[in-house]
Amino acid sequence: MRTFHITWFAFFLCFVAWFGVAPLMPVIREEFHLTKAQIGNIIISSVGITIFARLFIGWLCDKIGPRITYSIILILGSLPVMFIGLSNSYESFLLFRLAIGVIGASFVVTQFHTSLMFAPNVVGTANATTAGWGNMGGGATQIIMPLIFAGFIGLGYVDASAWRYAMVVPGVLLFLMGIAYYKFTQDTPEGNMADLKKNDPAYRMKAAESKGAFWKACKDIRVWMLFLIYGACFGIEITIDNIAAIYYFDKFKLNLETAGLIAGLFGMMNIFARTLGGYFGDKAGIRYGLKGRVLFLAFALFMEGVALILFSQMTVLPIAIAAMLFFSLFVKMSEGATFSVVPFINKKAIGSVSGIVGAGGNVGAVLAGFLLKDESLTYSDALFVIGCTVMAVSFASFLVRFTKAHEAEAQQEMNESLGTVSSNTETQVPAMA
């Protein structure tokens, strides 16, 4: 449980750092005289590099374990966050935004580490909660960063300096978290991977059997269907994280703090919404097997598309906020449901599968970014098109199928975990861990 809490909090800080500049974009846009197309390029850069980073990090997790991998991401990722204030043009800002995007690979480690720590009957809920509470940073940053910015303004700094100093704060926190992650977590309930490989023959044999797992994952069509599905949920979430503040600022003529507060509500839904997706995925899995998890995922994703279409058409502020929250509920439930399926695709390559599927989220965000930068489309028009696309993608869920042998194996593991938890109260924590 210590690893659980450290993991979600680390991911929370990663999200605050990753999207820290998003609510400050109205000020940055004015300073650098950015066009809509340039803002679109900045959005694409912030999520595009993460595609490759997630693929690499997924492979690295399987090789050296989540503890060291996460520590590296946190410490190195803190540097561009702190130094983005050195940018003095659109081009230099774009490069720093590109470098910051690597932090998004932290999601893969979060899901991998949680999958190692929890039993099959609760792994979906645990995965969804660590990711959801981490994603909550995307909402918190919409509220926190304008307040930090306002604090520096209150100290007498002009706008051009205040946003720069504001970004140092999440950068420092990220650096300190990297040290804490290395010191206070371990790779698995049994210990760190390096120690297990050295001292445990059974573990060495298991590690040898998993060689080539990344390429096996690449050949599995189910992995690519989940890649597509995650692009249609997480990809859209981080797109909204990037544009929500400027969307409300421009469309409803709000000030920076109010626009950031409303945009923050979207991300703050992660405190429970993504967990619901994992929870219902687990419940469907217990009752209907692996196909139950997939059916719930299809439902949640379809409803996400419907809700996004509704939000895109709202012109009255209170109704727009309500529609956004309805959409937020289903986009986050879809993400949780996706990663209630992922741990069951290939037990010998959880890191690689998580990396590929996680990269799909960023591919979705990049494609959405290209649509949003189109000068001929308003943000509302682009969101309508995205909503229709999400509805269509939901049917890809039906291509995520499992053999009878796979279903039977998963059911046996489920029964064992449920039996362990219910039969002996003294073993509840180990069964969950």
Image: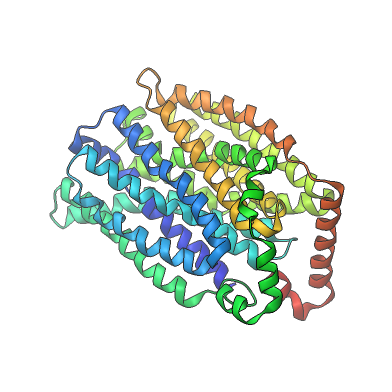
Q: Quadrant of residue 111?
A: bottom right
In this image, 306 relative to 92: left or right?
Answer: right
Quadrant for the N terminus in the image: bottom right
**Foreground of the two, 12 or 83:** 83
Q: Residue at x 58, y 73 (%)?
A: 193
Q: Position of residue 58 (x, y in %)?
A: 54, 55
User: Residue placed farthest to the top in the image?
Assistant: 376
Q: Residue at x 30, y 54 (%)?
A: 80
In this image, 95 relative to 181: left or right?
Answer: left
Residue 369, relative to residue 7: is it above or below?
above
Please count the marks in the image.
0
Q: Is residue 315 visible?
A: no
**Foreground of the two, 198 or 240:** 198
Quadrant for the C terminus in the image: bottom right
Q: Is residue 403 visible?
A: yes
Colour approach in the figure: rainbow
Residue 26, relative to residue 413: is it above or below?
above
Q: Position of residue 53 (x, y in %)?
A: 46, 50
In this image, 94 relative to 228: left or right?
Answer: left
**Foreground of the two, 163 or 117:** 117
Q: Residue at x 72, y 65 (%)?
A: 119
Q: Position of residue 252 (x, y in %)?
A: 36, 30
Residue 412, relative to residue 32: is it above or below?
below
Q: Residue at x 31, y 33 (%)?
A: 39
Q: Position of residue 404 (x, y in %)?
A: 87, 48
In this image, 368 relative to 416: left or right?
Answer: left
